[in-house]
Every structure is written in structure tokens, then in C-alpha cells.
């Protein structure tokens, strides 16, 4: 639980699945340390929210309509952007997609199928990403 003295972290959830966005939002709400600055169902909307709201952390699905997650990671390379935690069904432990996402700058990868079963692990990863963002600021 977050005390008044603790700073809440802001997060942008990028996923085209309403169900997955809802699960992630529920996990974030239970943790209490997060402010959801908006879900984005596509990369175009995500670009606007990143520019206008400056989240501390981004979660990103790789399988997105239009511009995919890996292409978006390419786009972010070389720019000042928040840490990106990839949450995707294609990023199981030691998968080629996980390795590629990390090469393209993802802070970490998390298997979407494990969202509920391993929610505390996801929260630890997101908190580490937020700490990285805080120290970079």
C-alpha cells in the first residue's frame, strides 16, 4: 500500500486487447503505487500519450495492429523515453522475441499468459523500471 509520502509512478499500458488492458490495470490498482495515465490500443495513440503525459514506465504488447511493438521499440531507440516492459504472449522465457525486444531496448519482458499467476513478479519488474527512470531523470 502506498503512503502519502511515497511517490506514485505513472504507467502507460499499450495493448490492443481490452481484456489484457483490464487485467494489467487491475494488477496496478491492487499494488497502489501506480497512476494509469491512459491505456492505448494502438501505437499512434501511445505516441500522443507519451509526448503529452510523459509516463515513468510503459508496458507494450508486441502484436499490435498497424505499427507492431518491435517496430515501435526501433522507433524509440536513440530517444529519451521511459523504460519499456514488454508484456506479450510471444515473450516467454528465453524466446527469440524476448531476446530481440531486449536488443531493441526493452527493459524487460513478461509473458502475458502469466499476468494473473505472477502478478507480484510483474510489479517487481515495473518498480525496477520506475527506479531506473527516476535515477535517469
Image (cartoon, rainbow, N blue to C red):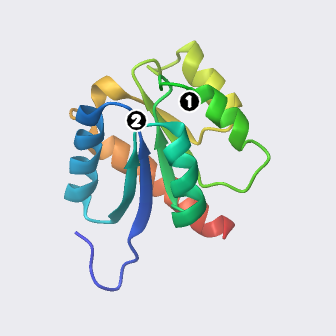
Query: Residue 81 appears at what percent x and percent y?
Result: 66, 54
Front-lying residue, 128 or 50: 50
Q: Please tell me which residue is depicted at 52% across the width and 61% down the height of the picture.
A: 56
Q: Position of residue 15 (x, y in %)?
A: 40, 35
The answer to whether 15 is drawn above or below residue 39 in the figure is above
Q: Quadrant of the N terminus?
A: bottom left
Query: Circle 2 sits in a helix, a strand or a loop, which is it?
Result: loop
Q: Which residue is mark 2?
A: 15
- In this view, the residue farthest toward the top is 96
Q: Give x and y (percent) for residue 108.
A: 53, 38
**CA neighbours of label 2 inside 10 A, class few (<14), some (14 to 19), many (20+):** many
Q: Position of residue 75 (x, y in %)?
A: 71, 38
* For residue 63, above or below residue 36: above
The numbered mark at residue 69 is 1
- Point out the image quarter for the C terminus: bottom right
Quick one: which residue is furthest to the right in this view?
A: 78
Residue 115 against residue 135 in the figure, above or below = above
In the image, is 112 to the left or to the right of 101? left
Within 10 Å of disc 1 (Cα), the crowding (few <14, some 14-19, many 20+) is: many
Which of these two is toward me, 13 or 96? 13
In the rendered image, which quarter is residue 107 located in?
A: top right
Distance between mark 1 and mark 2 Cα atoms? 9 Å
Which is more N-terminal, label 2 or label 1? Answer: 2
Please identify the quarter of the rendering in which residue 10 is found: bottom left
Locate residue 131 relative to residue 74 in the image: left or right: left
Towards the viewer: 109 or 22 = 22
Q: Nearer the viewer, residue 59 or 43?
A: 43
Q: Quick check: marks 1 and 2 in contact, CB under 8 Å?
A: no
Report the number of numbered marks.
Answer: 2
**Residue at the spot 29% in from the left edge and 85% down from the top edge:** 4
- Say which element carries label 1: helix
Amino acid at each position: 500500500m502506498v503512503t502519502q509520502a511515497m511517490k506514485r509512478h505513472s504507467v502507460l499500458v499499450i495493448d490492443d486487447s481490452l481484456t489484457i488492458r483490464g487485467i494489467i490495470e487491475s494488477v496496478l490498482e491492487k499494488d497502489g503505487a501506480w497512476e494509469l495515465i491512459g491505456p492505448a490500443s494502438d501505437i499512434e495513440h501511445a505516441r500522443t500519450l507519451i509526448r503529452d503525459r510523459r509516463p515513468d514506465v510503459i508496458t507494450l504488447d508486441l502484436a499490435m495492429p498497424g505499427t507492431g511493438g518491435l517496430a515501435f521499440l526501433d522507433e524509440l531507440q536513440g530517444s529519451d523515453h521511459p523504460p519499456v516492459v514488454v508484456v506479450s504472449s510471444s515473450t516467454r522465457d528465453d524466446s527469440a522475441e524476448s531476446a530481440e525486444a531486449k536488443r531493441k531496448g526493452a527493459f524487460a519482458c513478461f509473458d502475458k499468459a502469466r499476468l494473473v499467476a505472477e502478478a507480484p513478479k510483474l510489479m517487481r519488474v515495473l518498480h525496477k523500471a520506475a527506479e531506473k527512470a527516476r535515477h535517469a531523470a
